[in-house]
Amino acid sequence: MQQRCASSAVNLCHKILQPHRVASVWPPPPPPTPPLQPPLQLSLQPPLQPPLCDIFINHRGVDTKRTIVGLLYGHLFRLGLRPFLDTMNMKPGDKLFGKIDPAIRSCKLGVAIFSPNYCNSYFCLHELALLMECKKRVVPIFYDVKPSQLRVVDCGISSAEELERFSWALEEAKYTVGLTFDSLQGDWSGFLNCATDAVIKNLVELEDAN
């Protein structure tokens, strides 16, 4: 009974919406002018781009590239993560800031590897400051150096504003819980596993927070 009622109601609606038949008129009236349509609006927003990397590795190459940094990068890459390392993700002709700054801004996590010559590098300090300014979570690794030994040095190439910016970022990192490693007496295999675990745990926490 309900189906019959529904069918009848549908048929009734069709009949109501059908145009009434009228006597034919000659000549027939011209067709109605269609309403003007607004111009098509094209979206100017670019499509969302995936992050350039998961982890940005901030380091001093002369101290670490052939040891801890290269090993950590390889370990993370083999796990299917996307670490950013200048020598691996950049090619001759790339602009340093043109590649590094976007990678920092889009990364999920920063790993700052502090070493004896770290504070002598303008680029190291700039990368660290940008990570902090972008409010990225940073995992500090103190490699053959103690946090108390890290100080910004005025080499005459940075302005007073930059020196203040670098000192602030360095203090933020020094007072963040991190890892320490002695390259002469430490267990390399154990340390790499520990550093990788710290990276993965932080990535998981960041994903859960989002």
Image (tube, helix red, strand yellow):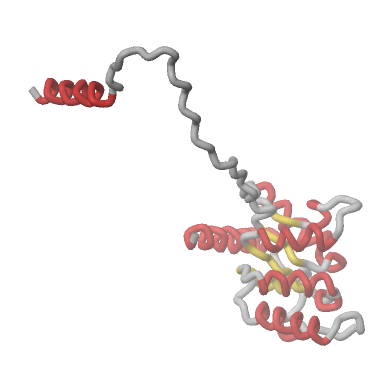
Q: Residue at x 86, y 54 (%)?
A: 94
Q: Is residue 205 above or below residue 13?
A: below
Viewer-proximal residue, 4 or 194? 4
Outermost residue, front side? 26
Residue 169 sits in which quadrant?
bottom right
Residue 54: name its quadrant.
bottom right
Evaluate whether residue 16 shows in this view: yes
The one nearer the camera, 158 or 6, is 6
Task: Pinpoint residue 59: horizontal percent, then vertical percent.
Answer: 78, 67
Residue 120 located left or right of residue 147: right
Q: Residue at x 60, y 76 (%)?
A: 177
Could you tell whether 125 is left or right of 22 in the image?
Answer: right
Report whether 35 appears left or right of 50: left
Query: How many numbered markers are drawn?
Result: 0
Q: Position of residue 48 (x, y in %)?
A: 62, 49
Q: Residue at x 71, y 63 (%)?
A: 104
**Residue that protrudes farthest toward the left in the picture:** 1
Q: Quadrant of the N terminus?
A: top left
Q: Residue at x 30, y 22 (%)?
A: 19
State which quadrant residue 15 falls in.
top left
**Is any part of residue 49 visible from this angle?**
no
Q: Position of residue 34 (x, y in %)?
A: 49, 31
